[in-house]
Amino acid sequence: MNTQASPVQVYVRIRPTASFAHELIECLPDQQTLSIRWRKDSKKGMSNIQLNSWLFKLNGVLHNVSQEEVYDCVAQSVVLGAFEGFNGTVMCFGQTGAGKTYTMTGAAEAYKQRGIIPRVLQQVFHEVEHRTDQTFSVHLSFLEIYNETMVDLLSALKRGKGVNNGALGVVEEPGGGVSIKGLTLHLVHNEEEALNLLFEGEMNRIIGEHALNKNSSRSHCIFTIHIESRSRTLSDAKYITSKLNLVDLAGSERLKKSGSEGQVQREAMYINKSLSFLEQAILALSDSRREHVPFRQSKLTHALKDSLGGNCNTVLVANIYGEASQMEETLSTLRFASRMKCVQTKPSINEHIDPVLQVKKLQKEIQFLKEELSTYNTLTYRVGVFNEILSETQVAEVKSQVQRYLSGSLNEIPIVNVTQIQEVFAQFKKVVLEKEEKLRELQLKNTLVEKAKITTPSSVAEMQDSSSTVGEVERCGYGLGLADSSQRHQQDISRKPTKQKRTSRREAALNPMPTVCRSGASVETEQFLNQVNQMSESNMVTHESEEQQRTEPNLTEAVSSPPPKADAFEDFKAERGSEINRILKENKAVLLERRSRLHTLTDVINATKRDMDSIASELQQYRGQSQGQFVSAEGEHVMDEAELSLVMQLRELKNRYRKTYEEYNSTKAEVSYCQHLVNQCRIRLLTEFESWYNESFLLPDQVLSVLEGGPIRPGHVPVDKALTLEDDGQKPFKHPPDNPQETSSAVSFYNAYNRSLQRVGR
Ligand code: ADP
Ligand code: MG
């Protein structure tokens, strides 16, 4: 038995007779071939004798063989296959009286003449007894199909599974098999119990025949043995099932219908209509080009669907008479048999998994693995490692780690185990989703603002005209408002000229990024740039007094808009720009340290120079006083102790001066270099922030409007313009051309610039 396509096995059994038609039927020595020669008399008399001969090649010809030999040849391997998990079907087909029931059930009165069904039951229980490594359950069912009515021959027992309360029906199962809904299945524990049911079913068939005046040769009987086996030794959730269908078909004789007078053609059809459908199904099955097989045409073909075209080892026994008088039906049976031989089935093991056992097995496995892991953790000193689903506290800890990691206060998240890693990812995802949600809300608000502007121009104009209208810009110093920025800018400047000038001068002195208020840039832009310039100073300069905050209405709160740039900038520094901001801070710290060192060195040099000058004048004075006092034999000037001491001091001071001056020069170069780095970082932080701000909060047309030189709204600082405010003599950016057409997209420009910075690792 294998899972490959296998043809239906077909045997012919000839009913023993004293008048065997030797001249017409010949069993060839291979015991597999029947040669039929037949002369058929036409209705018109002996003058029209037709001589024909046929050869039928089968799997075996059973002529004058005992019931035991028939069983061994036909059914034994099918039963063994059922114990491996393959379904099996043995069916008898043939003319009434040809020996189908004798073959299938046998003669009840003689044990030796018992048929295939009792022998199958005997073998089944023999196997059950001998296969001690498995446990089996065997159920029986007995179905009769008479005129498209299905009868449960064992329903009267009312003790089986699936008690038959209503009409029976053929049900197609998910794997392509079929079952009979409502048919009772009876658990049997031994051969005797099984035989009792077989005989009881046979008895019910005869009783039904008398009561309903029906003819048993016109009904089909399907006796089914359902076997389920599980391994005794392996606690496996897998189990196998199989069905053995033992089918005694109705008589296959045909009804001859004469055509109208003069019509030569004769039409013959089965007395039992369902056999016509069986033949049609077999024809379709044996023709590989046919896609559709009409199984559902009759109850019989539907019930035998998986026996004929499915997952089953199928054997057909074609019962024929040996007499010459039955030759026409014999030929018809043999034709059916040879067609059946072309039908292929695909037997496969019916393996299932018991869900309850599977759960138990997996639970056991989980427990075992937990213990293994716990042992491993102990052996490798992995104390406190958790392998279970994380508790709320653990989740909270992971969340906090992720937040600290994102804010930069935690350098890395230590990896503990897979569960923890998954939670880390989950927390990251949450953060991203929250940000996306926030962004969507902001964009929605922004769109609403735009719509509000379009739909209520008068009210907006009113607000814009109102001299008392001051937005978020004025309130917090950095926010965005809808009021015309240049107007407010003018107002602000006229209101506070002294303060503006003072701030500008101070920043110009402190910083190489002077704050220049350019035409078109708003007060907020200016303030924002001031903030960028003073990033190292923690306190933001607030330009508005609290009094103004109280008296001036807050337009931004009334109509929502992108967040104030100062707030956004703080967010940016904490998140996206945290790395560059950190580098900037570091560079600034180095710069400050170097500057302070430069100051110290300057002081040292100046002090040394003062000392040198003082010593030099002292020496000069001393030499003037003691001129020629000490002269050597050679007439050379000899220094006394005091003069020598002064000379030595002077030399030491000169040395110090030289060394300090060298250090001063190198520190000066370092200061200059650090200054350059700080500037670069500032520019990068600014450009990245602009890019992020535009991407995050502005609608594409707003960005475009800004880029194309449209009205600049408060808070929308074109990056290129902002960058021109860098007046440090080492601008990395070209001045934007005045002609808007020549202006390439600032966004793509600074994006490209940022990319190039990343490439060169600056
Ligand atoms: P079917 O079921 O095909 O209508 P049966 O099995 O009832 O035919 O057979 C009709 C009769 O022929 C029965 O009395 C049966 O005992 C007998 N018979 C059929 N085949 C054999 C056989 N191989 N050996 C002995 N008797 C047989
Ligand atoms: Mg019969």
Image (tube, rainbow, N blue to C red):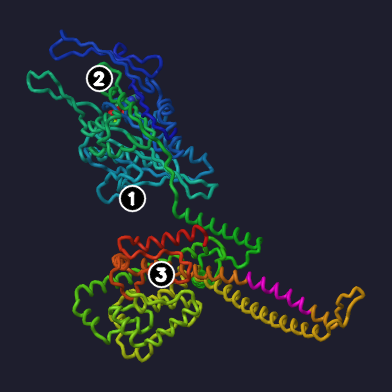
Q: Are marks 1 and 3 in contact (CB under 8 Å)?
A: no
Q: Secondary structure at mark 3?
A: helix
Give the quarter the ligand 2 occupies.
top left
Label 3 or label 2, whichever comes before in sequence order: 2
Residue 713 falls in which quadrant of the image? bottom left
- Is 722 above or below relative to 341? below
Nearer the viewer's eye, disc 1 or disc 3? 3
What number is the disc on residue 750?
none
Residue bearing the label numbered 3: 724
* Magenta span: 649-666
Inspect the image, locate mark 1, and give the three-letter code of the amino acid beneath it: Gly
**Mark 2 CB lies closer than 8 A to ligand 1:** no
- Is 366 above or below relative to 480? above
Residue bearing the label numbered 2: 326
Q: CA distance from mark 3 to mark 2?
A: 113 Å
Residue 375 visible at all: yes
Q: Are marks 3 and 2 in contact (CB under 8 Å)?
A: no
Is 98 a magenta residue?
A: no
Residue 391 visible at all: no
Residue bearing the label numbered 1: 162
Q: CA distance from mark 1 to mark 3?
A: 89 Å
**Mark 1 CB lies closer than 8 A to ligand 2:** no
Q: Residue at x 57, y 57 (%)?
A: 368
Q: Residue at x 26, y 35 (%)?
A: 292
Q: Residues within 10 Å of mark 3 (few under 14, many from 20)?
A: some
Residue 257 falls in which quadrant of the image? top left
Inspect the image, locate mark 2, and give the three-letter code of the amino acid beneath it: Gln
